[in-house]
Amino acid sequence: MSAKKFAILVIPEGSHRVRRFSVQRSLLNWVACGMVLVLLGLSALVFDYVRTNLDQSEFARLQVENREQRDEMRRLVVRLEDLRKEMVVLAQNDAKVRVMAKLSRPKGDSLSGVGGPGSDDLPQEYSDIQRRIDDLRHQIDLQRESQEEIQGFLNDQRSLLAAKPSGYPVKGWTTSSFGMRRDPFNGRRKMHEGYDIAARTGTPVTATADGIVSQSKAVPGYGKMVVIDHGYGYRTYYGHNSKNYVKVGQRVKRGERIAAVGNTGRSTGSHVHYEVRMNGVPVNPKKFF
Ligand SMILES: [Zn+2]
């Protein structure tokens, strides 16, 4: 292919004369180059066009996605706000219960702590939602602590209630109440540190509160006596029994039979000498009837 010139023959159909063109090889080269360039240019155009189209559909897709995400975020915020409102109600109830239980205000001030600025508008950042969730989390922790405190308090109250003497230890009639009185044996004025309730010998004597028997024996003056330790500083004494039914260390419930009425010790008739002591100091049992 080293020829410098080419001949192009144009042969028409029929009997027309054959035309002959003579073409320089360099011209052919130029034409070929030009065609390659045109092709390259065309493909660049097509490529650009396709890419633009793709970009646009991607853009549209992202727009939709973005809108969906914003909607999702809005729903999330609404739900967070619902939760926050419920927390406010819970905190208010908690505060009421604390007032009823005469407990101090919860630490962390859970009522005003709930919330935050502009809870209804859409947050711009996920970090904002995160912050709201953290706030709620914190509120829930405070609530839990407060609830545990209330629960502990109520448990204490229940044990205190069970431990606090209540009612009479025996069915009978009062023969001597708490306070200064004339001694039935020698007539001298003397402090009577209990409450005397007369009843027939053998009548059951019952514990006036839950507790543990700390004494069950004959004591000079008191005769056969039972002492019950109730905790919280309370102790009750039941004297002059004809019989004690309980042993030291025994756990007793309120209303449980512990002895039988009698006339043992320094007594002028069948009765129970009932004492309530608070931290060792005799108090008027009348306050507990
Ligand atoms: Zn007495």
Image (cartoon, rainbow, N blue to C red):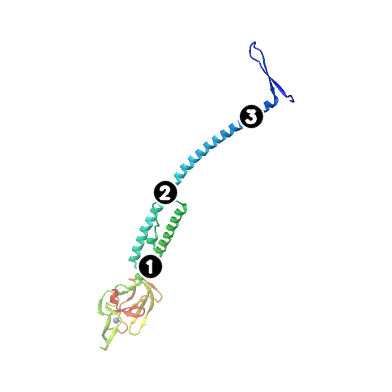
Q: Residues under labels 3 and 1: Cα distance?
A: 97 Å
Quadrant in the rendering for residue 287: bottom left
SS label for mark 2 = helix
Q: Which residue is drawn at 36% across and 82% down?
A: 218
- Residue that mark 1 sits on: 153
Q: Which amino acid does label 1 sit on?
A: Phe
Which quadrant does ligand 1 occupy?
bottom left
Depth check, mark 2 against mark 3: the one in front is: 3
Picture residue at 42% right of the left edge, 48% below the top: 74
Which one is in front, 62 or 210?
A: 62
Mark 3 C-beta closer than 8 Å to ligand 1: no
Residue 150's spot in the image, x, y percent? 38, 65
Find residue 90 and report its image quarter. bottom left
Numbered tag placed on residue 34 in the rendering: 3
Return the residue at label 2: 74
Q: Position of residue 227 (x, y in %)?
A: 36, 78
Q: Which amino acid lies under the numbered mark 3 shown in the image of this protein?
A: Gly
Give the number of the disc on residue 232. none
Asked if the residues shown at circle 2 and circle 3 are in contact, with their CB atoms under 8 angstroms apart, the answer is no
Residues 125 and 214: in front is 125
**Residues under numbered marks 3 and 1 in contact, where contact means CB atoms less than 8 Å apart:** no
Quadrant in which the C terminus is drawn = bottom left
User: Alpha-carbon distance for marks 2 and 3?
Assistant: 59 Å
Classify residue 241 as left or right of residue 22. left
Q: Which residue lies furthest to the top in this view?
A: 15
Mark whose residue sits in front, 1 or 2: 2
Residue type at tag 2: Arg
Q: In this view, does 46 lie above or below 159?
A: above
CA gap, disc 1 and disc 2: 42 Å
Determine crowd level at label 3: few under 14, some 14-19, many 20+ residues with C-alpha closer than 10 A. Answer: few
Considering the image in quadrants, where does the N terminus appear? top right
Mark 2 lies within 8 Å of ligand 1 (Cβ measured): no
